[in-house]
Image (cartoon, rainbow, N blue to C red):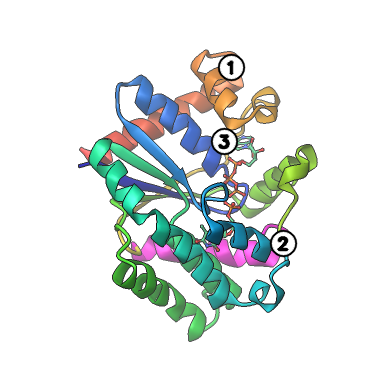
Amino acid sequence: MGRLIVIEGLDGSGKNTLAARLQHQVTADGGRMHRIDFPRYQASIYAELVRDMLYGRLGDVSESVYGGALLFALDRRDAADDIRKALRDNDIVLLDRYVSSNAAYGAARLGGPAESGEAIDFPAWIQRLEIDRFGLPVPDRQVLLGTPVELAQQRARSRADADAQRQLDRFESDQQLQRRTAAMYAELAAQQYLSPWVVLDGSTDRAPAADAADSRSAADADAAGSDSAAGSDSAAVADTAAQLRRLLS
Ligand SMILES: Nc1ncnc2c1ncn2[C@@H]1O[C@H](COP(=O)(O)OP(=O)(O)OP(=O)(O)O)[C@@H](O)[C@H]1O
Ligand SMILES: Cc1cn([C@H]2C[C@H](O)[C@@H](COP(=O)(O)O)O2)c(=O)[nH]c1=O
């Protein structure tokens, strides 16, 4: 039975890039890894609706914290059997975002950890909905990519400038929401919400050449050791992969 590993973090923090590099590293070492990114925009009607919600095209659902969270959760419920099958067939199933994204962003939308009441109770509501009621598998480890808010925002903005398909959505363009979400993630990691967490430094910069490439070719460039800055980042990825293997052994 494989282990379920989740990467969490802010928009633009580098989760997709890290996931691609870890997958490259683990498979190069002979491990079997399957990866799923949430929301599954290409595979699920719920995720399609999530996109509409994020770009303000879903009426008052776009304003609704609970309505939005339900769409994200239903996308995962639809994927539960695929996750269980992938766990049977692989050593590691790596998820780019999972239940804790819903807990962190939803609570942040309700005011974040500085607020009492609803915001603080929101992660427990998500756990009851997604884990207890929908029966989603509990992660073995959650990795928080702790990229500083300003740096993550800068990366998200550069990505939007370079790619017309990746314009900033409502969550990404709300800097205060990103700040509260960072605080919520720190809180969830400290509480070990759902399962054990590790926090990684997400601020190591890659070379601009690698930055312009998509994550798959960046991983290939790293593997080929194509330049020194990418090489040093590659060492950090190898470290993370080794750390994950240690955690899982
Ligand atoms: N270590 C890094 N150094 C420099 N640029 C990076 C680094 N990691 C990622 N980037 C760049 O930052 C942008 C965002 O990275 P990525 O798509 O991996 O983030 P993400 O956390 O998956 O974002 P989102 O949650 O918004 O989809 C991309 O353009 C990527 O190439
Ligand atoms: C899975 C999930 C995501 N979110 C938030 C996080 C992001 O701001 C967007 C979409 O994610 P992407 O990685 O930028 O495509 O939605 C959330 O609030 N709840 C979730 O379960």
Q: How many marks?
A: 3
Residue 204 is labelled as: 3
* Cβ atoms under marks 3 and 2 closer than 8 Å: no
Q: Which residue is drawn at the image coordinates 26% and 37% (left, top)?
A: 89
Residue 124 visible within the image: yes
Q: Is residue 92 above or below residue 234?
A: below
Q: Nearer the viewer, mark 1 or mark 2?
A: 2
* Cβ atoms under marks 1 and 3 closer than 8 Å: no
Residue labelled 3 has its Cβ within 8 Å of some atom of ligand 1 = yes
Q: Nearer the viewer, mark 3 or mark 2?
A: 2
Which secondary structure, mark 3?
A: loop
Residue 55 is labelled as: 2
The kind of residue tagged 3 is: Thr
Foreground pick, 59 / 117? 59
The kind of residue tagged 1 is: Ser
Residue at the disc numbered 1: 228
> Disc 3 or 2, which lies upstream in sequence?
2
Magenta-colored stretch includes residue 187: yes
Image: magenta residue range: 170-192
Residue 184 visible within the image: no
Marks 3 and 2 sit apart, C-alpha to C-alpha, by 30 Å
Marks 1 and 3 sit apart, C-alpha to C-alpha, by 13 Å
Outermost residue to the bottom: 117
Which secondary structure, mark 1?
A: helix
Residue labelled 2 has its Cβ within 8 Å of some atom of ligand 2 = no
| Image quarter (top left, top right, bottom left or bottom right) of the N terminus | top left
Foreground pick, 38 / 97? 38
Rendering coords of residue 247 (x, y %): 26, 41
Hey, which quadrant is residue 169 in on the image? bottom right
The kind of residue tagged 2 is: Tyr
Q: Which residue is drawn at the image coordinates 44% and 66% (left, top)?
A: 187
Q: Is residue 82 above or below residue 187?
A: above
